[in-house]
Image: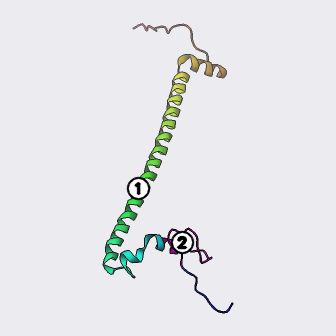
Amino acid sequence: MSGNNFKSKLKRGSGKQKTGGKKNLFALIDEKINITGLIGEGIPVRLVPPFLYAATIALIYIWSNHRAENTIRKIERVQQEVEDLRADVTTLEADYMYSSKQSEVAKKIEVLGIYEIDAPPTKIKAKK
């Protein structure tokens, strides 16, 4: 080890890395996309407002979609609950109509000692 030696850079298409070290993600992205060739050494200030405007519009669009999907899920949940309640109401109405029949009422009050009259009602005539 007589001194520091610079290692040669990786040639395109060789497939092997001569440096022996690993490249990080940002170095690979910069190598593949060549961002500095597109925009130069820095971000032009004139591009910042349109980019921020587009990013804001994109965020509003994403937020709106999420809110709409949540609202749709809530609506479906409430519709299912309404259908369940409607089925319960129909069942309760049928039970009520059945239990309010004269024969069913008569069966329920027999326990209390009240019996149903089998004879038809008679007219009482009063003499003047």
Three-letter code for the amino acid on which mark 2 is drawn: Leu
Image quarter of the N terminus: bottom right
Would you name the residue on which mark 1 appears?
A: 65
In the image, 97: left or right of 62? right
Task: Decide which of 108, 11 is in the foreground and name it.
Answer: 11
Kindly identify the residue that appears in the image at 34 percent across and 80 percent down: 44
Residue 71, above or below 18:
above
* Residue 91: percent from left, percent from top: 53, 29
Residue 9, above or below 98:
below
Would you name the residue on which mark 2 appears?
A: 25
What predominant SS class does the magenta segment belong to?
Answer: loop
Q: How many marks?
A: 2
* Residue 114: percent from left, percent from top: 62, 19
Asked if the stretch drawn in magenta spans residue 110, the answer is no
Residue 9, above or below 108:
below
SS for callout 1: helix
Image quarter of the C terminus: top left
Q: CA distance from mark 1 to mark 2?
A: 32 Å
Task: Decide which of 116, 27 is in the foreground and name it.
Answer: 27
In the image, 1: left or right of 31? right
In the image, 1: left or right of 72? right
Magenta residues span: 9-29
SS for callout 2: helix
Task: Decide which of 34, 64 is in the foreground and name it.
Answer: 34
Nearer the viewer's eye, disc 1 or disc 2? Answer: 2
Kindly identify the residue that appears in the image at 53 percent across and 26 percent down: 96
- Work out whether mark 1 precedes mark 2 in sequence or the reverse, and give the earlier one: 2
Residue 110: name its quadrant.
Answer: top right
